[in-house]
Image: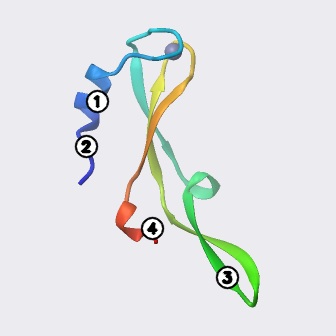
Amino acid sequence: MLPSFEELKKNTTCPECKGTNITLGYTFGEGGIHKKLNVLGMDAYRQVTHTTMLVCKTCGYVIKAFAVEPEKLP
Ligand SMILES: [Zn+2]
């Protein structure tokens, strides 16, 4: 089950700059999480889910990233 991102935002301090202005970011498209496959003896990757990230608005540090559908990963 995914955590409450609003709660996480409130309770997170940036480890880089100690800032508390944390916002949410999302990856889509090529930034998604892929799983590794083997196709005809070669490595291949297929996207299975996206991520939700906690990002420091002060310095841009990505503090945490969560797979949106972790159950899809092998
Ligand atoms: Zn920061």
In three-dimensional space, the C-alpha distance between marks 2 and 1, rounded to whole angstroms, equals: 8 Å
The answer to whether 49 appears left or right of 9 in the picture is right
Q: Dot 4 corresponds to which residue?
A: 73
In three-dimensional space, the C-alpha distance between marks 4 and 1, rounded to whole angstroms, equals: 23 Å
Q: Are marks 1 and 3 in contact (CB under 8 Å)?
A: no
Q: Are marks 2 and 1 in contact (CB under 8 Å)?
A: yes
The circle on residue 8 is 1
The circle on residue 38 is 3
Residue 61 vertical placement versus 19 (above, below): below
Residue 29 vertical placement versus 52 (above, below): below
Q: Nearer the viewer, mark 1 or mark 3?
A: 3
Q: Dot 2 corresponds to which residue?
A: 3
The answer to whether 11 appears left or right of 27 in the picture is left
Q: Position of residue 24 (x, y in %)?
A: 41, 32
What residue type is disc 3 on?
Asn
What residue type is disc 1 on?
Leu
